[in-house]
Amino acid sequence: MLRFYIKSAVRSFKKKKGFYILNISGLAIGLAASLLILLFVIDEMSYDKFHKDHERVYRIVKDFVNDDGSRLPDATTPPALSIAIQKDIPEIAKTTRVFPNWGNKFMIRYGEKNFIEERLWRVDSSFFDVFTFPFIAGDQKKAFNEVNSIVITQSMSKKYFGNENAIGKVLKLDRLGDLMVTGIVNDVPANSHFHFDFLIPVKKFNGNINSNWGFYNFYTYVTLKPKTRIAQVVPKIQATYQKNVSAGKNIFYAQALDDIHLTSNLKWEIEPNSDKMYIRIFSLIGLFVIIIACINYINLTTAKSSLRAKEIGIRKVAGAVRLSLIKQFLSESLLIVLFAFVVGIFIAQLLMPVVDQLTNKALSLTTFLTVKWISIILGSVLLLGLTAGIYPAIYLSSFKPVHVLKGNTVSETKVFSLRKALVVLQFTISVVLIIGTVIIIQQVNFIKNAKLGLNKEQVLIIGNANYLQRQDLAPIQNELLKIDGVKSAAVADGVVGGLNWTTSMNVKGSQTQQLVNLLNVGYDYLKTLGITIKQGRDFSASYPADSSSNGIPGTTERMSGSIILNEKAVKDLGIKEPVVGSLVSIGTNNDTTYYVTVVGVTNDFHFASFKNEIKPFAFFVDHTRYSNITIKLSSGDLKRTIAGVEKTWAKFSPDKPFQYSFLDDTFGKLYASEERFNKVFLYVTILAIFIACLGLFGLTAFMIERRTKEIGIRKIIGASVSGIIVLLSKDFIKLVLISFIIACPIAWYFMDQWLHDFVYRININAWVFVISGIVSVLIAMITISFQSIRAARVNPVESLRTE
């Protein structure tokens, strides 16, 4: 029987190739898009699950709590925490600490090879007990027995040693000395929330950090013992902190390791994370695309039903029962869906390079080559074939042989109403996606073009300036200013928009402390970035006190130079007018309190994601701390100017490579996920609209085919071509307008929810819906008009001859 159904389906395909090609194309494109979206979702949800016992691994984080009760969620912890909770809490099996490079760069040499590297971390020897990074060479248990040991990844081994055995070889690191390679591990998988190239022991630190509760620069991870709930452990972690820091206000809590990538957006994340909301949105879009493709199939199959009416009548007269006809049509549906699935896999593979570029991933269809996924996908295809084919099968098998063999028209009152409803549903989804795309583009453009309060354009940053001798700083800046195209230059120990330190401050006379972001800078730094001074003045060499340190006679107070605050810092610290001249405490050491004098106030400026409110920020002058040179360039010949900068660098640091970046790239990373989401959403929307239009195109063709004689008669009695086009189009345009009315509140609700994540956001304007409505109607009109114009221009004599 199955063989008969297959033969019947093949004969039907040969008779109506155009119909089946249209149907298969829509399904194949929909399935390809859904497979690619599924790949993306699987990858996003797989982060950190490659570690053994990942479900028992947690990261300990905390909220900084200011004296006014406000909180700043932060991923870092002090180094003493790991040691204390391992000792105090029996439910914890293992703890480990991670100290990343924090923006530092290291010159690493082996023989004639030398490179500047960034991803060098300090970790505990227990790192490999908590995380699963298999050793290719070396002994995991003994890797950090010696303080001057280093573990490298496989790619770094290839980079420095080629095909040589790296174990026992010595790498020379500036500032860290000679380190022996004691282990080689596999490269960190892409689906990890952190990545490293080199690991050295934490004990490489000078001094005893194990009792330090104030150095918030470490990440702490724990593995719980089996059958232990994290809810039991968190209160004990907080109690351990309070026992060691009696006056501490910080609140500690835990994050499941495999939740970090999709749920964590704390200050000082090791790497930018994603957002679970995006997973939900793309999953929903994938479902929408499949729904649109199924609607196409149902509409096209039922619309073509009249062409099979006589076939069904003859089969029934010959003895076929309704159940056998339903089985036949369901078999055809399954074959079509299976064939569409095969074509969809081929399309997905062709689109893979584009998807990888859009998502910044390396996705592969081989992910599905497991028993689990093969079973799920085949089951889904089977379900899809049955779901898409069940209604057409029931509808087609219901034809009365007496009516169809007499040539009577098949009644389509009910099915036509269903077809209308499905077209409305299809275009409602499409209009929601169009409106969503317009709003997402608006928000991303708002972020990219917003006035930040600083000028990030044409700002070049030499990132390894810490290799320069302090006495060379002024001379190299003077040389840089002589280059045609260089407007200003200044040193700093960080990058606005990148890594910035924080410290607690309070205005003199107040005990209320606030956490403030800070940056140590050179004299012309604010000028270089175009940050406006609202009150007071900029730092200047004309004021030696800006960077000097001296005591206040008769007190245990010490002046430590000057400070410039942004407006938010002034407000949060509660500094009264006149602000300029106020003293701000930046810390106490033993009995000495250190103060700085406020010499200026800047306008507020953005230095973090637009999802976060502008935070307090402070600038200091400290000539002993510098890691980069920030250079403002003119908009002239950038290539020639950069070549001049490189030549100047080589003059002062001939043995260190010239490395640079641009500040706008640093800021671009702050909204990279939104821009990526914007692009993916746009392409998926175009794809969904294309599939919907494919169905509308086919549906229009079949509707026109049924009304061929009517069109001929209307032309004979005087109907114009434009009148015929309006006649054929108006029913579909009405459906699109109904879709638009339904889609508007749905789109507004979901996009308003998305925008709620942003502190600085656009307002959703009415014109967005008007434009989206016009675009929807135009898309439908263009799709319909091709068939309508052709039908309206046919000679009426030929139309009336058509049977």
Image (cartoon, rainbow, N blue to C red):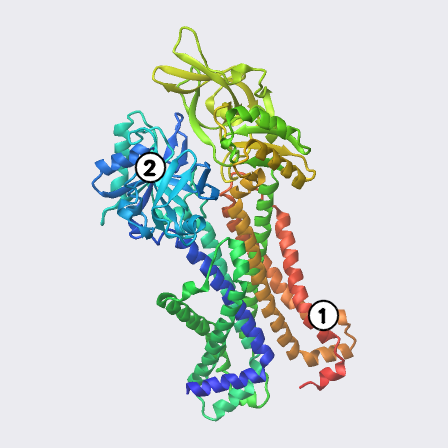
Check the image and report above or below for 360 versus 418.
Answer: above
Q: Is residue 425 left or right of residue 633?
A: left
Q: Which residue is depicted at the point 55% across and 26% down?
A: 473
Q: Which residue is mark 1?
A: 725
Q: Is residue 748 left or right of residue 263?
A: right
- Across and down, in percent, residue 331 comes to 45, 80
Specify the farthest residue to the top. 554
Task: Give the quarter of the image for residue 501.
Answer: top left
Q: Nearer the viewer, mark 2 or mark 1?
A: 2
Q: Nearer the viewer, residue 679 or 117?
A: 117
Decide if residue 418 is in sight here: no
Specify the farthest residue to the left. 90
Check the image and report above or below for 452 versus 786.
Answer: above
Q: Nearer the viewer, residue 575 or 449?
A: 449
Decide if residue 466 is in sight here: yes
Q: Which residue is mark 2?
A: 202
Label 1 sits on a secondary structure element that is helix
Q: Is residue 506 left or right of residue 675?
A: left
- Across and down, in percent, residue 780 comes to 64, 64
Mark 1 residue crowding within 10 angstroms, few (<14) / some (14–19) / many (20+)? many
> Marks 2 and 1, Cα distance to the nearest angstrom?
77 Å
Specify the farthest residue to the front. 111
